[in-house]
Image (tube, rainbow, N blue to C red):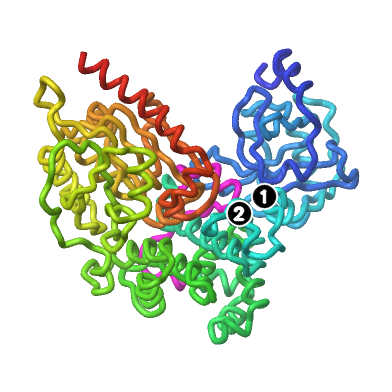
Amino acid sequence: MGDVQSSESAATSREDTEVSAENLLGNHLFSFDGQNVGRVDFVFTGSGGEAAGSRVAAVASHFRGRKVRLWKLVPIRGARLRHDGAIVVPFGRELIQSAPELASAPTDLGAEMASRVQNHYSGVHPGIELKGPFSRKPLPASGLERFAPSIEEEPESGATGDSLILSPIPGDEAFSHSSESAHWAQAAQLIGVGVQLSGHHDVLDDWEDDARTLLIPRVESLRRGDPWPQAKVALEKMGLLDAFYSVQKAPPRCEREFATLQSRLWEESYLNQCGVSSEAATALLYSGLFSPNELVRTSSASQLSWLVEDIEGEIRNHLVQGCQSDSYTVQMISAGALARHEEDHEVLQNFINSQPSGPTEDAHTSTIVHGTWAANGVWWRPEGDFFQFLKQRVSPDLYDGEGYFRWSAKWKKKERRKAGFKLVDWLNANVNPLPGTRIREFDTVFGHSHGANVALAAGLIGAKITFLVLLHPAIDRRSPREMQLILSNISGVLAFFPHFDLTVLADRSLRGFPRHDEKVVERNIPGWFKHDALLDPYTWLQNGLINELNYYRNQARARRRDLQF
């Protein structure tokens, strides 16, 4: 009997605690046998108030692929909050999968639907009694203050060091505030829906836990072409077209109206109340072009650039201006989007490297590989603060001669592959063979962003690397066979990344490696969104990353020694 709770699971539930409506919202719901059913997006409460028997959860269903379009209805009777935060109900996955469902989020659950839910579950669990109607609890963003305890405070409250965001603002709350933290969260919402609209759901799947925390809406993809007509459909159906044009004409004078417009578009994207969630998400991207914040404008423009055949007008202007920003993240997002359409645009020439590596010296065995658009950066050069930090505290053998490694930093994959061959040539010119062999091998390679792909391309053609340290990696798609060949030449990989790296998501790159390989360790650092957090020594010192790196590097060195013997 698949829906009869086992004595073992019953014993486990006795150790759990009662669950409140607030704990339900935004968390994942599990069947009694440990199967992940989906995320609780909203809760309907009946006349019994907070009593468990008077509540029904609407769970975003993943049964039909990764595009969440339906909500399964699940009674909360007997639910328990597990020690890890998950919600466990005394029903089997198959019973929930066949339950009554919603395709949108009505303001209340009528008596007829409540009766259908009761009849569905009472055949197995006779004690269930649902008395409708049930009113919908506030949107999850209003009920998850635990994710944003200080959103009303000054911008500094959400950051440490160089504005490292520690408590992201979830859902539509991000559009109700104008702090720095709010702007980062708005950009995350825009990029999160943009990734899906362009059909790259697998990219968002890489960041599933972060997307759940942020309450990123789940939407279907659009065909590439002209997305404005679809955005207009949503604005007209929701009665927001006049408000949109009003904000477009004078955004600085319509701050309150602008916030309301974006919140309503987010709500429709999330709940699909009018049946136009994807269209509303597209309109949300267009609304972001009017934001007073350059990160938000750039994020919108970059995501729309994936949906149009040719960039022009405001989209193009925002990307060009973003390339000249003082913000590293804005620069990277803008340059990547602009390069897809206008690879030779003059503003991009500041980011690429046409200068070859200089004269080389022997006996250095570690190096840094910068990412795309990094040619004008200093951090990866011997005179850079971060370079000196690594050399003094992490890898004393880091190469600091005139011939330090550099590559074109252009965005296309073929440039990264060419750089991989160049890194092999650099290895042969700069590293002495291992004693008694002809094998030349890096000890440690530090790769930032697409620098990870340069190092992996080198590994694919035979470069030996004892330990590969990846900072904010943006991984190109490769076949399992290619990854197997690469990892056969690398003894250990340690990948560091923040939560929901906007630049990696905007680029549609993957985050990591095959999870089953024991050589590969992936670590989240505290902090959200930024693509340069790990280029700051403060981040390393505050989070004890040097000790962690040394621990895994020693394992990789031992692995390499075992292979040699």
Q: Quick one: SS at disc 1?
A: helix
The answer to whether residue 267 is seen in the rendering is no
Indicate the quadrant containing the N terminus: top left, top right, bottom left or bottom right: top right
Classify residue 194 as left or right of residue 554: right
State the count of labels: 2
Residue corresponding to mark 2 = 168
At label 2, which amino acid type do we have? Pro
At label 1, which amino acid type do we have? Phe
Farthest residue in the right direction? 48
Residue 490, picture quadrant: top left
Do labels 1 and 2 touch, CB within 8 Å?
yes
Q: Is residue 394 above or below residue 157?
A: above
Residue corresponding to mark 1 = 147
Give the magenta range: 204-229
Q: Is residue 53 magenta?
A: no
Please provide percent x and percent y for residue 256. 67, 77
